[in-house]
Image (tube, helix red, strand yellow):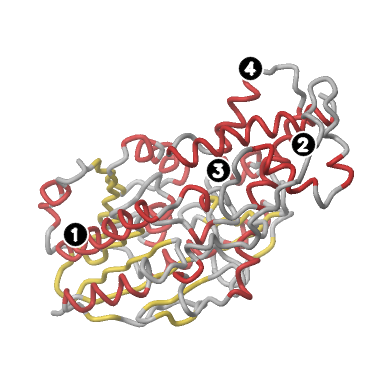
């Protein structure tokens, strides 16, 4: 592909990304892969260049542009070399004719700016779109941190998690014997701290209520040393099915995956009522804390979707509270930096439940109401809110 043809390819993919963001369609990565699956002539350098164009536009616009061409033209306005590729020749984009659109600018969509947690100022927003590091969690069921470091010479210890390692950008950990042997799992350092803050230990009964593909489930299993009962539930069959091979590789043998029927979760969990030592609610959320990994999420969120998520979070916390034994612990977390999903959600639950907020045993984070916030700017992690309660005895 010529350089101009790469720009045109990016424009065509961006048109699909914009449409999918508005309709709830496939993610950008999926659309990029689909585009090239029918264009075998494109080499690896072509694919990398096109993908880079696509994600530069996604990062530059906090809200979707009118079209892929508008998105690229806004970048070209400040880059003469890119503007020169709009030459109308061959498979390249049509020549620039008339005014060039300007991006909206900024990091946070305008409608969300006033809804960020008040502890997070605009000076921190640029970090929301910085490149995320490749963090690993050492799996205590298979190795110590020292053994994992020895097996991964390129890795360094992370500053906050006692189980964290970090690899250079572009590393392929899946090719490493330490990965195949289950020594490590890919997990952001912030997620590691959240799992440790649960306080899971051998012999406990623990429920991971929104387990997904099992990232935090695996961390909890390691803290429990494969002793006790760990029930991992979700309403998404596809995500839950991805857990089995991960459990096998990690050597986690105590996990009980359980698929729940949406709207009938209470019935499916009746056998656990009042018996859990710990329930973790890593709830579905806006993902505002993960924009550095998924900047496209800014294009997909709207008032209606956010309202549904906040309602679901409230439902899940209440559901979790029924499962906890007297004196047991509930931990609520969202990868969000919005007040209504974090501190306000926690305050409302405290008021209606009678459960007792607890200090979090975490080595990082700043106060946000009764919980803590981790942010890319302060901790270098994904953005999270986490809170913890104890059930009255």
Mark pair 3, 2: CA separation: 34 Å
Residue 385 in picture, x, y percent from top left: 42, 69
Give the quadrant of the C terminus: bottom left
- Of the two numbered discs 3 and 1 on the same chain, state the one appearing first in sequence: 3
- Of the two numbered discs 2 and 1 on the same chain, state the one appearing first in sequence: 2
- Disc 3 crowd rating (10 Å Cα; few below 14, some 14-19, many 20+) is few
Q: Which of these two is toward me, 213 or 185? A: 213
- Of the two numbered discs 4 and 2 on the same chain, state the one appearing first in sequence: 4
Element assignment for label 1: helix
Residue at 51%, 71% in the rendered image: 374
- Of the two numbered discs 3 and 2 on the same chain, state the one appearing first in sequence: 2
Q: Which disc, if any, is residue 93?
A: none
Mark pair 2, 1: CA separation: 47 Å
Element assignment for label 4: loop
From the image, state whether disc 3 or disc 2 is nearer to you.
Answer: 2
Determine which residue is flagged by label 3. 181
From the image, state whether disc 1 or disc 4 is nearer to you.
Answer: 4
- Of the two numbered discs 4 and 3 on the same chain, state the one appearing first in sequence: 4
From the image, state whether disc 4 or disc 3 is nearer to you.
Answer: 4
Residue 294 in picture, x, y percent from top left: 56, 50
Residue at 84%, 42% in the rendered image: 82
Determine which residue is flagged by label 2. 49
Q: Which of these two is toward me, 353 or 87? A: 87
Determine which residue is flagged by label 1. 319
Mark pair 4, 2: CA separation: 17 Å
Element assignment for label 3: loop
Left or right, 122 with respect to 117, comes to right
Q: Quadrant of residue 105?
A: bottom right
Q: Which of these two is toward me, 6 or 323? A: 6
Determine which residue is flagged by label 4. 38
Mark pair 1, 4: CA separation: 46 Å
């Amino acid at each position: 592909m010529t350089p101009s043809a790469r720009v045109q390819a990016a424009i065509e993919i961006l048109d699909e990304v914009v449409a999918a963001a508005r309709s709830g369609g496939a993610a950008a990565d999926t659309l990029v892969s689909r585009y090239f699956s029918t264009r075998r002539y494109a080499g690896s350098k072509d694919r990398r260049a096109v993908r880079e164009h696509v994600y530069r536009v996604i990062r530059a616009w906090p809200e979707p542009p009118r079209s892929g061409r508008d998105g690229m033209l806004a970048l070209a306005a400040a880059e003469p070399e890119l503007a020169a590729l709009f030459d109308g020749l061959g498979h390249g984009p049509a020549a620039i004719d008339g005014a060039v659109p300007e991006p909206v600018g900024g990091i946070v969509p305008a409608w969300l700016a006033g809804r960020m947690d008040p502890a997070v100022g605009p000076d921190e927003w640029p970090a929301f779109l910085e490149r995320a590091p490749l963090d690993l969690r050492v799996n205590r069921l298979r190795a110590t941190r020292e053994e994992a470091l020895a097996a991964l010479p390129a890795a360094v210890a992370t500053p906050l998690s006692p189980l964290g390692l970090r690899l250079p950008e572009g590393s392929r950990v899946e090719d490493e014997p330490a990965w195949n042997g289950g020594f490590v799992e890919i997990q952001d350092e912030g997620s590691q701290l959240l799992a440790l803050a649960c306080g899971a230990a051998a012999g406990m009964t623990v429920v991971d209520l929104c387990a997904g593909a099992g990232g935090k489930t695996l961390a909890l299993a390691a803290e429990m040393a494969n002793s006790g009962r760990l029930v991992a539930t979700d309403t998404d069959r596809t995500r839950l099915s991805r857990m089995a091979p991960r459990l096998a590789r990690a050597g986690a043998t105590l996990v009980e995956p359980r698929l729940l029927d949406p709207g009938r979760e209470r019935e499916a969990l009746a056998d656990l009522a009042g018996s859990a030592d710990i329930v973790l609610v890593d709830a579905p959320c806006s993902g505002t804390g993960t924009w550095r990994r998924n900047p496209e999420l800014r294009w997909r969120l709207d008032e209606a979707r956010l309202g549904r998520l906040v309602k679901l979070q409230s439902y899940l916390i209440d559901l979790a509270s029924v499962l906890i034994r007297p004196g047991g612990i509930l931990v609520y977390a969202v990868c969000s930096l919005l007040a209504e999903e974090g501190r306000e959600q926690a305050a409302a639950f405290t008021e209606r439940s009678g459960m007792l907020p607890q200090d979090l045993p975490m080595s990082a984070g700043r106060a946000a109401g009764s919980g803590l916030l981790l942010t890319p700017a302060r901790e270098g992690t994904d953005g999270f809110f986490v809170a913890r309660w104890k059930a009255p005895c």
